[in-house]
Amino acid sequence: MTAVEGYQDFDVPLDYFNPQPDHCQLDVGIVGAGIGGLAAAIALAKSSHNITIYERSKFSNEVGAAIVVAPNCSRILDYYGFDFEKAGATVFTEMEFIDGSTLAVNHNIPCDRTAEKYHGKWYALHRSDFHAQLRDHALSYPNVQLCLDAKVEGVDTRGVLTMKNGEVAHKDLIIIADGVKSEFAHLVAGHPVINKSAGLLIYRFLADTSDILSDHRTRSLYETNPRNKMFMAAHEELKLVGGTLQNFGFFHADDLPFDDEAVWDIEATTDDIRKDSQRLNPALQALCEHATQPRQWRLIERNKLIENLTKDNAVLIGDAAHPLLPFQGQGAAMAIEDAAVLGVLISQMSSRAEIPSRLALFQELRKDRVCAMQIFSRQQQDHASMDEAEKYVKGKLPTCPAEYHEFGLRPDVIADAKMLLQEHFVTDVISPCVL
């Protein structure tokens, strides 16, 4: 792999993780084979730990339409040799924000410039393709095993997993990555973890490119635009987001009942979309008419932010720890940052007794960042939200798109983790691995 010049992440060569005679190889159990769990397996596999991923489904099929991969995420995946081309990714060159009534451009973001500035491209790709490529990448390591139809019923944060079939697995490290509906987040958080509606539903649908271009009502939306432009149209509470030309999301108010048994994936029809899009520009309404296999998804947030990400020999990552709303495009990025930081901190270990101390460094590096990103990912940044964010942000709070990008895209999490590790642990002194 060719390192990206001029960016600190890549001052950490991949052979940094090569195990030495004095290094411990851990038995690691990962609960959940979503984006965060698979990324953690990739990051930890570099140090030759023995990794088992437990996935409750018979085949972990990621749901949803498209996913945006921001530069801080693509930069890390490039570092690990992830093949975006094989995953069918499209590179964004521009994001455009337009008025949902008039189609006037409010502002735009030149993605090629931010990609150059932050040394990582903006990508869009189908979530299932992204997940499949992550899975293939993780399983390319001989020390990574994926167990399907493997329901974890119980977690002891000291290193024990109890399976539905009664089997017990003893692990040196447990990574809880079982998503926003996590059954075990409360064990680490130290308080009940309750999901609630964020007040919005999103229609997700695909539309055929040829249909859009052959319809005189929608053709103008794309005739003058490159195919790899993202546009966002806003009208009061309504938002229509076009990623790649054929992928769309349409946000509207969530007025459906919500409880612990609430359905989060809801069937929809083009008539439903037509009814809910009446306040948009006619061209955008017509675009919605081309929806194929539309579904609605609830946007979810937590009753309170989780500040405790580790306990004993267990760590909480990804949506299980910090589900983000989609308005900063950082959900996958935060999970993959979590994984990358773990990959550094759980390397070059001379004793298994170091695990809680290493996880304490994870807590130090990740807590403030993921809490702040959850706040910033909300649709509206009111005074209460900004007051809350001050607790987690050192220095000036971001107030405009450029400043949010600087906050989100700039950090070198791999380099930061290496620096913190070297401050707390002497890694160049050979000593036997303590069992």
Image (tube, rainbow, N blue to C red):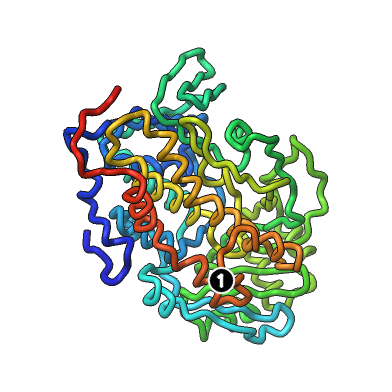
- Please name the residue shown 17% across and 33% down the image: 21
Judge whether residue 209 can be spotted in this image. Answer: no
**Along the viewing direction, whichever of 142 and 3 lies nearer the viewer:** 3
Judge from the rendering whether residue 244 lies leftward or rightward of residue 234; answer left or right: left
Residue, disc 1: 404
**Along the viewing direction, whichever of 332 and 160 lies nearer the viewer:** 160
Choose top left, top right, bottom left or bottom right for residue 171: top left
The secondary structure type at the circle numbered 1 is: helix
Q: Position of residue 224 (x, y in %)?
A: 52, 86
Judge from the rendering whether residue 338 lies leftward or rightward of residue 154; answer left or right: left
Q: Position of residue 257 (x, y in %)?
A: 82, 45
- Please name the residue shown 68% across and 53% down the image: 299
- 104 to 140, vertically: above or below: below
- Please name the residue shown 62% across and 45% down the image: 306
**Along the viewing direction, whichever of 212 and 407 lies nearer the viewer:** 407
Choose top left, top right, bottom left or bottom right for residue 349: top left
- 117 to 364, vertically: above or below: below
- 60 to 216, vertically: above or below: above
- Please name the residue shown 48% across and 33% down the image: 314
Q: How many marks?
A: 1
Judge whether residue 322 can be spotted in this image. Answer: yes
Q: Position of residue 223 (x, y in %)?
A: 52, 83
Q: Position of residue 215 (x, y in %)?
A: 61, 76
- Tell me the amino acid under the disc marked 1: Tyr
